[in-house]
Structures are given as structure tokens and as C-alpha cells.
Amino acid sequence: MRRPSPPAAVSLFYAASFAVLGVQLPYFNLYLDVIGLGGFEIGVISALVPLCGVVVPTAGGLLADRLGRRRSIVLVSAALALAAFTPILAVRGFAGVAAVVGLYALVRAPALPLVEASAVEIAGAGGPDYGRMRAWGSFAFIVAALCAAPVVARCGERSALLLMIALLGACVTTAALLPADSGGRRERRPAGSARAIVRRPDVLLFLAAAVLSQAAHGPYYVFFSLHLKDAGLPTTTVGLLWAVAIACEIMMMLRMPAILARFGTGRTMTLCLALSTLRWALCAVTVNPVAVALAQTFHAGTFAAFHVAAVTHTYMVFGRERSATGQAIFSSVTYGAGNIVGMVGSGLFQEILGTSALFAGASVTAFVATGLMAPLAWRRDDAREPREGAPV
């Protein structure tokens, strides 16, 4: 059997990986609610994924850059994730679910940042742009969310677990198809070099704003589906609203090369954060399906455009030589620490303040992030035309 090309293999892994999230994000917390877990317990379990994402991806990135064994690490990570999550079928209490999800999150954390590093390198070497490869993940998310909705509605929330396990098996298969490892160690560089980059004031501002941006998504990822369900919306409508967001995300990712060429990474990220302020404010004041659908279209900017611009910015800052390390640090800080703040905070205050208040707090958080990112929007070295080898 002929192996797919590197861009196709990366796209397939994105598809399998985000299909898992297409079931997990809309429906897994509904299952936790059905088995009797409270808002705080659901928030804690949701936070286990980013908690493991704070340290593990950075260690995986450093190891991959040192050994040149990206595919091997991704394949082992995918196989262990499948083995770790399968026992979820046999546990129901908070402690058991937390143990399974914690182990699953720990072993799965290194994989995606390493594939991100491969994607930006492929794009920088003249292959398809990063957004085009990453869009396959978003497309798979929307298909999984839509297809899972009638299954969950007919068979119950537990069926979401079986769908996730099947898709985790697909992750193992696609990991085996990724581009071959380089087969040897890379030249060792000074240990403090990556730390020196992170300590630069412009990089600190970028990472701080990225943390707050992701933290503002916390109420959305943890309680959006429950918020709509409590408002009386059927499960199918909830799935469709998630699909609206991801459809807009796909369209935006396909347009990102032109957008970054015009605005640059700093200005793009600043505009996205301003849009995030508006999105969460809208979610705070209404559950009208039309208004919520409008807010979901903003996902094109608050997640898709921001993510592609941030990944591109990270590549520019760290360079090809430290691509895996740079993407791992960005992932650890943003999707690790940022999600912990947002998800744990949401779990702590949801039962006290209500979900609408959480979205209002998210709007304020995004506004602060906009202020932190704004100085980067007018930096002269944030070129509107990406430098040679940039992954756009």
C-alpha cells in the first residue's frame, strides 16, 4: 500500500485527532452530567486535559528536537491514549472518571504539538499552507459533531464514549502514516536558548495574551452545551450550533494566507481578541438560537484566525531549528495554562454565579488580552508579508 504524502498524512492525523474532539467537546460533559457529577466536578475533570498539557508537550517537544523522533513519539502517544481512555466504560464515580481522564490526557498531550511542528515545516518548505492542512481537522470536527448528535439523541450520552474510543483507534492508524523520522539526533544547542526567547518582552506579551484568550474560552468549552440544554434547546440543535462555529472556522483557515499577508500576525491577533470580547458578551446576554448562531460565526476569528496567526508567529519567533520546542511551549502555555484558568475558574463559579456571568467574565478577560496584544499590532518587525519559509 502506497503511503500518503507528508501533507496528506498530516491532514489525516488532524482529521482523526479533531474528530475525537468533535464528540468530546459537545457530548462528553453531557454524559458526566447524566451520571450525576456536579458543575465543580465537571469543571475539574475538564481541566485535567489542559493541566497535563502544561508540562508534557514542552518535554515532548524538547525530546523530539533532540532525538529527531517525532513520528515515534506521536505514535506511542496515540496508542497509549487509546489504551488509557477505554476503561472509561467501566467507571462512573468522580474519582474513577478523573483517574481515567487524567491518565488519558497525560499520554495524549505530546502528540498534537509535534504534528503542528511538522505542518508548519511542510508549509515553510513550499508545501500546502498550514491553514489548508489544519482545516481538515476542523472539517472532521464538524462531521463528528453532526454525526454524533443523532446517535447520542437516540442511544444516550454513553454512546459518545464508544464513538471517542473508535476515533482514538483512527488516531493510532494515522499516526503510523506520518512522515518518517529523521533517524538521528540533531545538533545540540545551548539549553538556555529557548528560555532566552521566551523571556523577551514581546514574547511574554504574546504568550500572556494567548493565555487570556484561551482562558476566555473556558466557559464555552465546559458549559456551552449544558447552558443551551438547560435553556430548552434539543441535543440536535446544540450539535448544529457547534457545527456553525466549525464551518466558519474552516472557511477562515482557508483564507488565512491572504489575511496574514495583509495584516501580519500581531494585528490579526489583536483584531481577533477584540472580536472575542464581543462574542462572549453576546453569549452572556441571550440564549436566543439566532443570536447564539451569530455568536458562533465569530469562532472564525476568536479561534481559527487567532490560532493560525499565533502558530505562524511562534514559528517566526523560534525558527525552524526549534520548531517542535516552540510549538510545544506555545501549546503548554496557551492550551495548558490558559485552559486550566478558564476551565477550573468556570467549574468553581458556575454553580455560584451562573453560566451567563461566566460569559460576562470571559468578555472582560478577552478585553484585557486585547490590550496586552495591541503593542504587537504596530511593531515594525511584524511584517505584513511573511518572511521566507513562514508557514502561511
Image (tube, grey):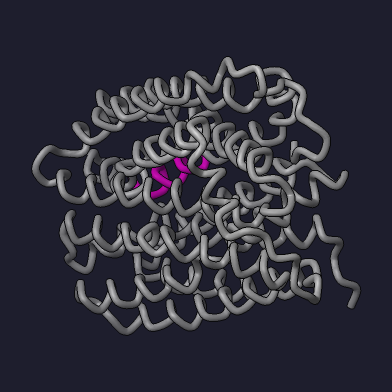
Quick check: 310 left or right of 36?
Answer: right
Residue 175 showing in the rendered view: no
Q: Nearer the viewer, residue 354 or 210?
A: 210
Residue occupying image coordinates x 15% and y 44%: 349
* Residue 16 to residue 356: above or below: below
Main SS, magenta region, reads: helix
Where residue 37 sits in the image (x, y, percent)?
18, 64
Q: Quadrant of the C terminus?
A: top right
Q: How many marks?
A: 0
* Quadrant in which residue 60 is drawn: bottom right
In the image, residue 120 lies in the stretch drawn in magenta: no
Q: Nearer the viewer, residue 328 or 179?
A: 328
Residue interval drawn in magenta: 234-244
Where residue 79 sits in the image (x, y, percent)?
57, 80
Quick check: 365 left or right of 138?
Answer: left
* Quadrant in which residue 102 is drawn: bottom left
Quick check: 347 left or right of 27?
Answer: left
* Quadrant in which residue 5 is drawn: bottom right
Residue occupying image coordinates x 75% and y 65%: 187
Residue occupying image coordinates x 51% and y 30%: 202
Q: Nearer the viewer, residue 45 or 59?
A: 59
Residue 40 showing in the rendered view: yes
Where residue 199 sits in the image (x, y, percent)?
48, 41
In the image, residue 243 lies in the stretch drawn in magenta: yes
Where residue 212 sits in the image (x, y, percent)?
37, 36
Q: Nearer the viewer, residue 386 or 179?
A: 386
* Residue 13 to residue 365: above or below: below
Q: Quadrant of the N terminus?
A: bottom right
Residue occupying image coordinates x 61% and y 69%: 63
